[in-house]
Image (cartoon, rainbow, N blue to C red):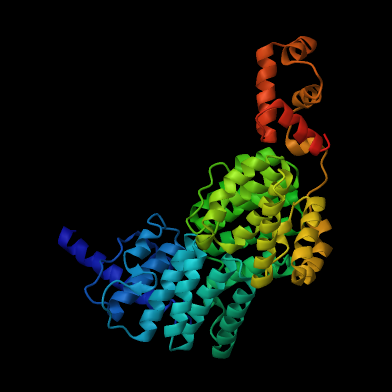
Amino acid sequence: MPNTQRSIDARAAFHAAVVTTAARLAPGHGIPEQRHLALLAEAPPPPLPRVWTDTAALTLAAVLVSRARRDALSEGLSLIDRYFVDTRLTREATLSDDARAHLLAAAGEYCCAIGWPQVGAQYGAEALLFADTDPVRYRAHAVLALGHALNGEYESSENDRAAAQALFTDNAWPDDEIDYLVLLAESLVAAAWMQPERLVAVSTILHETRPDDPYWDYSARAIDVMRGLVERDYSGALAANWQLSYGSRRHRSHRMIRDFLTCIRSDILVARGEYAEALATLSTGQTPPGHGICFPMQRSVALLLLGRDRELLAETEACVADETDHCLRTLTPTLLRRAIAFARIGSARRAAQSMEAALLLISRTGGSITPFIMLPLGETLALFDEVVSARPELGPLVTGIRDFLPSVAAPSLNPAEAIGLTPTERELAVLLSSDRNLADIARERGVSLNTVKSQVRSIYAKLGVSGRAEAVGELLRRTF
């Protein structure tokens, strides 16, 4: 076939994919075809028009949604920045309200997919502002529901999900036209509120509504893994997690879902007391700019339970320093873990401030008990008491959380296990409190002085100290 004809055919195929996909982004006209989504996800993004028209807006909307749904996210936020400043188009526009709303909703869905839920929700809110018809209002609420759920604003997410569901029911749209974003939002809220029966219901809808869509199937199976974690079926959930993470299904899945599976795998390992393995699992994780997935937060619980408090604080410093751009869902547990780490190193004021900030976030977002999973019970309760004494209005919230804490707290460990000392290091740690010098200790143990010095440096690193006296004091404080 001549090159000219191929070019004509390619343009015709692209145009057909755009028209069909754009018409089906909102319910009432069928669902987008996988072949069209695949074609648009591979196509170069459209050029920036001199003036935005409905055709240009719907073309970009179809491309953005296709990239989100086919996990073609390599351009990240730069793709959005090419066309928008915040939520404003960078060129003059002569757009109908619904076309603008479609484009804004598509940008919101793409932002959620790349892990920037705050920005995704911002675009969803703008889409709702311009939406003139029920189908487009439904799309805007779907984007808002997911953006709010990913950002830990669970009550707002539930409100948007309910509004979307009411529109869907009132218009009697076909079941298979339910928006994927609505289902993801519900799964996140159900997990946050520890409602395994809701996770089952969402997984069932994903499995049954579009059984031929591999992306829906993968997400359904990932939700089943989350349910296993909530129900503490750690062995079964871990096996299913490995299968999804390293099986052939991985190649037709969403990055966000794969990252969630990595975090769930880490959570399971932490729950089983395998802290070093959890850290290894997270070692290659790449945190997106909005911290919709936050690997420093995820690592912090294992560091806390290993007693590596100063390392935890250093690891998460950038998260709290950049909190205006940080996802609230992942910021809350970060603040809680930092509070305990600060208390351990003797910074009582910063510990109380961090705990207070976390509790205030939870009270204002309709938060969940999940940020408290695997926190040391006694240390958490002590900080509760300190904060409530200064902020009594937080008392009712803390009382409600207290009832759940024993069921989700970290298991009690002996001090050496909590610090992460090896058996050899435990023996040496005892000798450090004696008046023997390192040469005497080396002779007594039948090893070289260099070996003892190396082991001592390892103990210092795990304790977060720099000298022998400081190490002995830290060991005594931890009742070693």
How many labels sit on residues? 0
Position above or below: 35 against 471: below
Q: Is residue 431 left or right of residue 285?
A: right
Quadrant of res 466: top right
> Residue 431's x, y, as percent?
80, 21
- Residue found at x 73% / y 35%: 420
Q: Residue at x 67, y 61 (%)?
A: 358
Side (left or right) of 200 relative to 122: right
Is 21 in front, or is 411? 411
Determine if residue 398 is in view.
Answer: yes
Which residue appears at 65% of the width and 53% of the height?
264
| Quarter of the image where the N terminus is located | bottom left
Residue 239 placed where, x, y %? 68, 48
x 71%, y 26%: residue? 468
Percent position of residue 171, x then y: 54, 89
**50 or 215, which lies in front?**
50
Does residue 240 appear anywhere in the picture? no
Q: Nearer the viewer, residue 88 or 433?
A: 433
Picture coordinates of residue 375, whole percent (x, y) = 75, 52
Vertical side of 422 occupied by 63: above or below: below
Q: Foreground residue, 424 or 202?
A: 424
The image quarter in which residue 162 lies: bottom right
Q: Quadrant of the C terminus?
A: top right
